[in-house]
Image (cartoon, grey):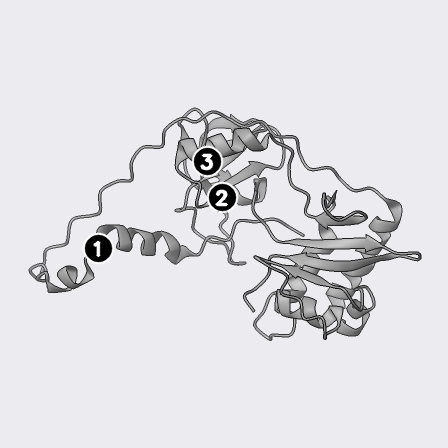
Amino acid sequence: MRRRFTLPALTAAVLTLVALTPNLALAQALPEPPVGLQPLPPPPPPPVKPYVPVPITLPPVFNDPSFVAFRKSLGDIAQHKDRAALAKLIIAKGFFWLQDKDLADPSKSGIDNLAKAIDLDSKNGNGWETVAEAAAEPTAADAPQHKGIFCAPAPPGFDPQAFENLLQATGTESDVTQWGFPVDNNVEVRAAAKPDAQVIDKMGLYLVRVLPDSAPADTAGAPSFLHVALPNGKTGYAAATAIAPLATDQICYVKDASSWKITGYIGGTQP
């Protein structure tokens, strides 16, 4: 599954509006500025403080030949949007769909539960794109509390206590989605959100903070550049494809006697 940050263009604007309008009734009572005069722009955001970097190890590629073949079949199914063929690659019973709790309906089949989790059957949904991304995802890691189950994408390796300290130091305990990691070493950070902008720094293999004003979006709806804050206090822009989110949905797999099957989903759309 291809990881990417999805930061709607309106998010930063809404956050700014809320921050600048603590009393909506008072704001509505304020007089309009005279014709020809423009209201003052909002104050700039506070400077980003340096933080202690938390080193990572990149997620492992899962090279099991049978799993590689399974992913190829999954990719072919996604290309043809063949729901019946997809159903054969999902366990019929016992499928789990985890958010705060298991949302899977035990009375329904695996395909029906997965379809609801990823919005597969909606004309305007991205369900088949999710399946295609899962087929293209080369990493997977075993689920610690579920023997024999592997989930993808795999997370990077890092010290959990160091990350907890980082969240507290940066005041981001309530929003882990602000954190990601480079998919390779020495990812270039540019002075502006342009591919030809000056390179001002390069990332090492550590967790990096992604600021909420990461935009504009490309034609696929994902931001083409992410506004990042580096541990040294510098801010700049990195290609969105070069930064993976730390918090992401996962598809989980299990190998039975004959082949791999999709056995669960972590995350997903609201039921």
Residue 87 in the image: above or below residue 173 = below
The answer for how far apart the CA atoms under marks 3 and 2 are is: 8 Å
Look at 54% across and 40% down and name the residue there: 180
Location of the C terminus by quadrant is bottom right
Which numbered disc covers residue 167?
3
The image position of residue 265, as x and y in percent, is: 67, 58
Q: Residue 225: percent from the left, percent from the top?
A: 48, 44
Please tell me which residue is depicted at 10% across the width and 60% down the height of the picture.
30
> 58 above or below 38?
above
Q: How much space separates mark 3 and mark 1, taking CA atoms? A: 27 Å
Q: Is residue 159 left or right of residue 42?
A: right
Q: Position of residue 100 (x, y in %)?
A: 56, 57
Residue 98: x %, y % from top left: 63, 58
Q: What residue is shown with label 2?
A: 176
Q: Dot 2: what SS?
A: helix
Give residue 21's mark: 1
Q: Amino acid at mark 2?
A: Val
Disc with the residue nearer the chain's start (3 vs 1): 1
* Residue 225 shows in the view: no
Q: What residue lies at 26% left-to-right and 50% top-to-bottom?
A: 19
Q: Quadrant of residue 102?
A: bottom right
Helix, strand or loop at mark 3:
helix
Q: Which residue appears at 42% of the width and 42% of the height?
A: 211
Give yes or no for contact between labels 3 and 1 (Cβ–Cβ under 8 Å).
Answer: no
- Identify the mark at residue 235; answer none if there is no mark: none
Q: Is residue 180 above or below residue 159?
A: below
Q: Nearer the viewer, residue 56 or 103?
A: 103
